[in-house]
Image: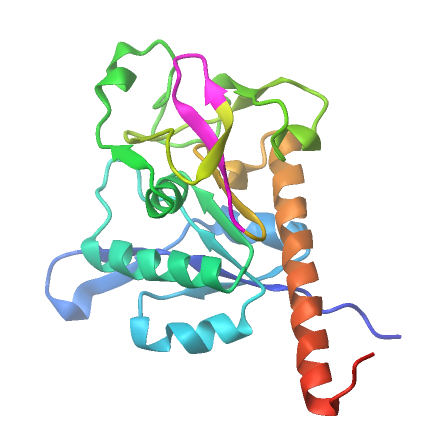
Amino acid sequence: MTHPKRPIVLLTSDFNEKGGGENNQEYRLQANYVKALCQAGAMPLVLPCVPDGLDDALRLADGVVITGSAPGVDVLAQRVDFERRLVAQCLDARLPLLGICHGMQLIGEHLGGRIVRDDPALLAKVTPHIPSAVADVLAHDVTLIEGSTLASWTEKIRVPVNSLHRHTLKPGGQYRVAAIADDGVVEAIEGIVDGFCLGVQWHPEYLLTDLDRQLWFRFVASCSEHGSRRVRVASLAVTGSDA
């Protein structure tokens, strides 16, 4: 008996310069991203910021996750430049794409949105967007926008989320706002593109709610469909069949 192939999902990671030159640089990734993807049925692979190898990596991939960054630490230009190229190629290839926190902002910016760095609106503390140094507790509710794909995954209109961010993404790009906080902060977007393209401002990799788990399963299901379609296309190209 054969088992279905686990879809391969590429994960971006933080690139850090710790001091001491090139011999003391590191890549960093929270293990809960890997746990969430494995539980949803995927095989995650960590993707380094190596532009020359990106085409080869994407030929292996069934989906891509642009992860969040370390709290309170600005993302280095080397990572941002690499991820911008990665987002563009994923969208061109209709590869399922999920952005989390920094990843949502990056996708939104690529689609024409505007990022507000250290948004002063967050200082009003109407909604606790930075309740603690680790996003392992639910911080506030968001309202899911009627008609969004995200809203179709649950019967609830308002759901609790965790939070850990200083920057915000404004409406106005080639995306739909799918969730919003009580203070107006955009909490989720869906790209107006072909294929799966979702960004969330919170951190679903902590798996604190049913919606978090649903999000990962839906994303991985889309990756599986993309992988199966890719295999069929490759098979037809080899056999020359129209079946």
Magenta span has 38?
A: no
Nearer to me, 23 or 79: 79
- The residue sitting at 80% across, 70% down in the picture is 3
Residue 12 position (above or below residue 136): below
Q: In percent of the image, x 34 and y 23: which residue is there?
A: 130
- Residue at 84% from the left image edge and 74% from the top image edge: 2
Q: Residue at x 25, y 15 (%)?
A: 123
Q: In which quadrant is the C terminus drawn?
A: bottom right
Instruction: Determine if residue 17 is in view.
Output: no
Residues shaded magenta: 180-193
Instruction: From the viewer's side, name the closer residue of 44 and 85.
Output: 85
Residue 86: percent from left, percent from top:
38, 61
Instruction: From the viewer's side, name the closer residue of 167 and 48.
Output: 167
Regarding residue 59, the answer to whether it shows in the image is yes
Q: In terms of image quadrants, where is residue 129?
A: top left
Quadrant housing residue 128: top left
> What x and y, as percent, mark residue 189?
48, 35
The answer to whether 76 appears left or right of 184 in the picture is: left
